[in-house]
């Protein structure tokens, strides 16, 4: 009768240090996918609850309808703008890593998987940093 070896919690604790770039790419891709799904449901719920006065033309024209005031209230918050920057970073990484995975599945760049993962991280950071001024215009801290 064979017994399986129990590595225990102490051995498993530092195991993340041994992960390769491919494993980190997989973990980040799954994580960003779940973040995007969560955002989608949150976005739908916020928009659907703010459409209460969609048929009131006078309120829409004077920008006092529930939808417009909800969006204006959210857009004026600094925290929401920071979360939008984070959402951009998550979406850009998920797209770039998805394209990288598509190329790997097609057999292009198999030898340079780790370099392409790091390139997608750097490009995500560059796009996110370049877009920060756009997201933070018109917001008071």
Image: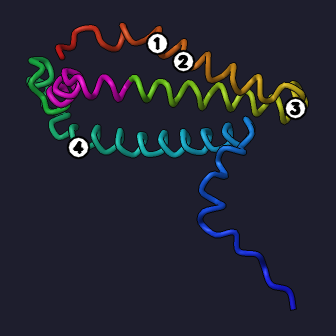
Q: Would you place residue 83 above or below residue 19 in this image?
A: above
Q: Which residues are magenta?
A: 68-84
**Spatial distance from mark 3 to mark 4, Cα to Cα?**
43 Å
Foreground: disc 1 or disc 3: 1
Q: Quadrant of residue 141?
A: top left
Q: In x, y percent, where is residue 87?
A: 43, 29
Asked if marks 1 and 2 touch (Cβ < 8 Å), the reply is yes
Say which residue appears at 66% left-offset and 44% top-offset.
17
Magenta includes 74?
A: yes
In the foreground, 9 or 39: 9
> Considering only order in the chain, which callout, 4 or 3, is on the residue closer to the N terminus?
4
Badge 3 element: loop
> In the drawing, does residue 84 fall left or right of residue 46?
right
> Considering only order in the chain, which callout, 3 or 1, is on the residue closer to the N terminus?
3
Magenta includes 115?
A: no
Q: What quarter of the picture does the N terminus occupy?
A: bottom right
In the foreground, 25 or 135: 25
Q: How many marks?
A: 4
**Spatial distance from mark 4 to mark 1, Cα to Cα?**
32 Å
Say which residue appears at 65% left-offset and 25% top-offset.
96
Q: In x, y percent, where is residue 61?
A: 13, 18
Give the residue pinned by disc 1: 129
């Amino acid at each position: 009768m064979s017994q399986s070896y129990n590595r225990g919690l102490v051995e498993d604790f530092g195991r993340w240090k041994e992960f390769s770039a491919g494993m980190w790419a997989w973990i980040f891709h799954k994580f960003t996918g779940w973040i995007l799904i969560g955002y989608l449901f949150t976005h739908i719920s916020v928009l659907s609850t703010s459409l209460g006065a969609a048929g009131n033309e006078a309120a829409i024209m004077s920008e006092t309808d529930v939808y417009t005031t909800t969006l204006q209230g959210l857009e004026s918050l600094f925290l929401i703008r920071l979360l939008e920057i984070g959402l951009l970073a998550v979406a850009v990484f998920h797209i770039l890593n998805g394209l990288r995975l598509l190329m790997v599945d097609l057999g292009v760049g198999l030898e340079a998987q780790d370099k392409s993962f790091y390139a997608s991280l750097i490009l995500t950071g560059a796009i996110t940093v370049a877009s920060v001024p756009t997201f933070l215009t018109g917001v008071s801290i």
